[in-house]
Amino acid sequence: MFKGGQKKDNALDLSKLVDKTVRVKLAGGREVEGVLKGFDQLLNLVLDESTEFLRDAEDPLRVTDETRTLGLVVCRGTSVTLVAPTAGTEEIANPFIQPEEEA
């Protein structure tokens, strides 16, 4: 919205991530990683060289290391819940899991 001639900035500036690898979480639990090629104001994303991370059959909330190659993908903005660059990120152990006590 324009107010007094000032443009309102988006909270998410994806232009810095174009041509970089990003991980996208979608509504319903699917996760896709690929090179961001384009986007629009509705958060529709175009990913190239994309890979889907498959979920565990026994625990659908857990993503496994098993993948499926998708290629060029268009993610609808209404389904996108998270966009994160993969460069500079690493997985850490969950600090909230309590070790099991031996009886």
Image: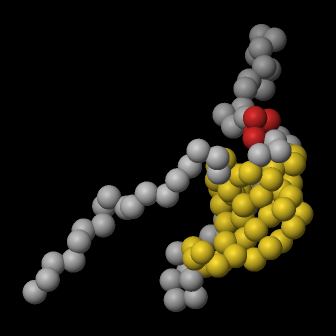
| Percent position of residue 102, x then y | 14, 83
Whether residue 76 is visible here, answered yes or no, is no
Task: Quadrant for residue 30, please give it.
Answer: bottom right
| Percent position of residue 65, x then y | 60, 75
Q: Residue furthest left?
A: 103
Quarter occupied by the C terminus = bottom left
Give the number of callouts: 0
Q: Residue at x 80, y 64 (%)?
A: 50
Whether residue 86 is visible here, answered yes or no, is yes
| Percent position of residue 15, x then y | 79, 35
Its colouring scheme is secondary structure
From the viewer's side, name the closer residue of 99 and 75.
99
From the viewer's side, name the closer residue of 33 and 57.
33
Looking at the image, residue 25 lies above or below residue 60: above
For residue 23, side relative to residue 34 (left or right): left
Q: Residue furthest top?
A: 4
Task: Quadrant for residue 14, please give it.
Answer: top right
Looking at the image, residue 65 lies above or below residue 21: below
For residue 56, side relative to residue 39 (left or right): left
Looking at the image, residue 1 lies above or below residue 26: above
Q: Residue at x 77, y 14 (%)?
A: 6
Q: Residue at x 66, y 34 (%)?
A: 11
Quarter occupied by the N terminus = top right
From the viewer's side, name the closer residue of 6 and 81.
81
For residue 26, side relative to residue 38 (left or right): left
Q: Residue at x 49, y 58 (%)?
A: 91
